[in-house]
Image: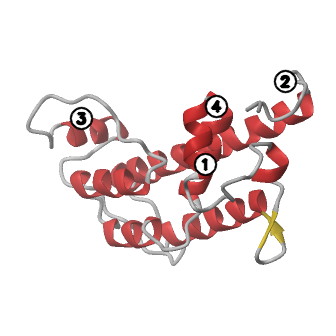
């Protein structure tokens, strides 16, 4: 059994779809990073018109990550895995963003598809047997499912959308909840 997404690994259509999934996951990580940095340093205005005050000891965006790193008892200069809700929520808490409770509630929402997106992203980025095993053992995808783009992202899920559309819809809902 091959773990390629198509018999021809140079098929540009399949490779483009795989890269779209990888980039969607990356865009989510970048959104979360900017959400926390801007919340801490830029006094953003929420969708409801409320101004978010800066976090303590934060004057500019360049102050945010040093404050985060200073919260560790042992030296650490590794940023959180921003696409992981728990790590983003923990970073928001450590930095002390004023809209922490809103961000934590939105990112911690039940039903967020980020874990299944992460599994698909890791498979398409790494294409190894370990990622196949994780997809099949996740409970999200059928155990005997082919690991191909069309059976991961293009399959129709409840709500009569494709899984890819479902990911995008839910990520937008979570993002909108984060900025309330």
Residue shown at 84% from the left, 23% from the top: 9
- Which residue is more in the foreground, 149 or 89? 149
Dot 2 or dot 1, earlier in sequence = 2
Instruction: Give the crowd class for mark 3: few <14, some 14-19, many >=20 residues within 10 Å.
Output: some
Residue placed most toward the observer, 122 or 80? 122
- Residue closest to the eye, 86 or 46: 86
Q: Residues within 10 Å of mark 4 (few under 14, many from 20)?
A: some
Label 3, label 2: how far apart the Cα atoms are: 43 Å
For discs 2 and 4, the disc positioned in front in the rendered view: 2
Dot 1 corresponds to which residue?
Answer: 135
Colour setting = secondary structure
Residue drawn at the location 82% of the way across and 40% of the way down: 17
Which label belongs to residue 9? 2
Query: Neighbour class for label 2 at 10 Å: few (<14), some, many (≥20)?
Result: few
Of labels 3 and 1, earlier in sequence is 3
Q: Secondary structure at mark 3?
A: helix
- Residue 1, above or below 31: above
**Residue 26 visible, this angle:** no
* 16 versus 84 height, above or below: above
Q: For label 1, count other residues whose C-alpha is less than 10 Å away and answer few (under 14), some (14-19) or many (20+).
A: many
- The disc at residue 66 is 3
Q: Secondary structure at mark 4?
A: helix
Q: Nearer the viewer, residue 103 or 44?
A: 103
Marks 1 and 4 sit apart, C-alpha to C-alpha, by 13 Å
Q: Which mark is residue 170?
A: none
Across and down, in percent, residue 56 comes to 19, 54
What is the secondary structure assignment of the residue under circle 2?
loop
Whether residue 15 sits left or right of residue 169 in the image: it is right
**Residue located beneath label 4 in the image:** 125
Q: Residue at the spot x=36%, y=56% of the render? A: 86
In the picture, the quarter occupied by the N terminus is top right
Q: Are marks 1 and 4 in contact (CB under 8 Å)?
A: no
């Amino acid at each position: 059994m091959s773990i390629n997404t198509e018999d021809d690994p140079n098929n540009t259509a399949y490779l483009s779809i795989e890269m779209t999934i990888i980039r969607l996951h990356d865009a989510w990580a970048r959104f979360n990073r900017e959400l926390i940095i801007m919340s801490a340093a830029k006094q953003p205005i929420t969708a409801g018109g409320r101004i978010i005050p800066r976090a303590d000891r934060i004057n500019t965006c360049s102050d945010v990550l040093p404050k985060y790193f200073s919260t560790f008892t042992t030296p650490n200069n590794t940023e959180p895995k921003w696409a992981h809700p728990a790590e983003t929520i923990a970073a928001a808490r450590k930095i002390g963003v004023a809209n922490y409770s809103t961000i934590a509630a939105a990112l911690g929402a039940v039903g967020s598809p980020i874990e299944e997106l992460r599994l698909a992203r890791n498979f398409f980025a790494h294409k190894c047997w370990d990622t196949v095993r994780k997809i099949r053992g996740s409970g999200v995808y059928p155990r005997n499912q082919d690991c191909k783009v069309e059976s991961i992202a293009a399959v129709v899920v409840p709500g009569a959308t494709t899984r890819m559309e479902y990911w995008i819809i839910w990520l937008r809902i979570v993002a909108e909840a984060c900025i309330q």
